[in-house]
Amino acid sequence: MTLLRRSVVQIRQQSSSAKKNITKGLNEVHRTQVEGGVPPLNYDQQRDKVWLGRHFGQYGVASNVEIGKLWPTVEEIQEINELKFYRPVKEAIELSQKLAKEEQERQRKHLEKVEKNLKDYDKQLAEYYEGLNAPPPEKTPQELANERRVQEIQEYFGYWIDPTDPRFEVMLKQKEAEEAKAEKMAKKEEKRRRTVAATS
């Protein structure tokens, strides 16, 4: 039994050592990271300021990054100032005071408007209820004529069309042209009948 136990223990140790040694298939950078070290900077793109800053932020002093290289140069500071990212303290204080005054003025006007509306609330509510109970205003002759036109066109063509639709005017002209033609034909027929009646 002891021999069997030894073989089982040896198999477990071999499998656990195989599990621990996972770095065999990794490249140098990943292997270094797994082992807790600082990966080397192999490429030129890794030597720019942004990459070095990330590297220093992740690995600290152990990254061997010169901290002086991470600071902006004089030219970069001038460019930042030219782009108005920099504002003097006095100017910033004045601006914040101005914005605070504008906000207070806006709030004051809003409160005045609310108070005025509250004073007029009962009167406006009464006017609203009177408007609900009032009879609808009478339509002008122009509105009645327009409604009649819309109704005639709808009956003539057999379907509803919006009066604001551009096709409405086209249909109206078409209907008027057909009515004028029918009226002309009726006059001709009347004239022909009168001529026939006069000759006989």
Image (tube, rainbow, N blue to C red):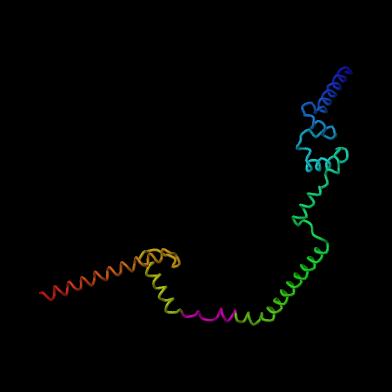
Q: Is residue 159 left or right of residue 64?
A: left
Let me know if residue 134 is in the magenta part. Answer: yes
Determine whether 56 is above or below 92 in the image: above
Q: Position of residue 4 (x, y in %)?
A: 86, 18
Please tell me in which quadrant of the rendered image residue 140 appears: bottom left
At a point 81% along the width and 30% down the height, the residue shown is: 31
Q: Dividing the image into 4 quarters, which one contains the C terminus? A: bottom left
Q: Which residues are magenta?
A: 128-138
Question: How many circles with numbers are drawn on the protein?
Answer: 0
Farthest residue to the left: give it.
Answer: 200
Q: Dividing the image into 4 quarters, which one contains the N terminus? A: top right
At a point 86% along the width and 21% down the height, the residue shown is: 10
Please tell me in which quadrant of the rendered image residue 175 appears: bottom left
In front: 64, or 179? 64
Farthest residue to the top: give it.
Answer: 3
Let me know if residue 80 is in the magenta part. Answer: no
In front: 62, or 180? 62
Determine whether 110 is above or below 24 in the image: below
Q: Position of residue 16 (x, y in %)?
A: 83, 26
Q: Position of residue 136 (x, y in %)?
A: 50, 79
Q: Is residue 169 left or right of residue 185?
A: right
Q: Position of residue 55 (x, y in %)?
A: 81, 40
At a point 37% along the width and 70% down the height, the residue shown is: 152
Please tell me in which quadrant of the rendered image residue 90 appears: bottom right
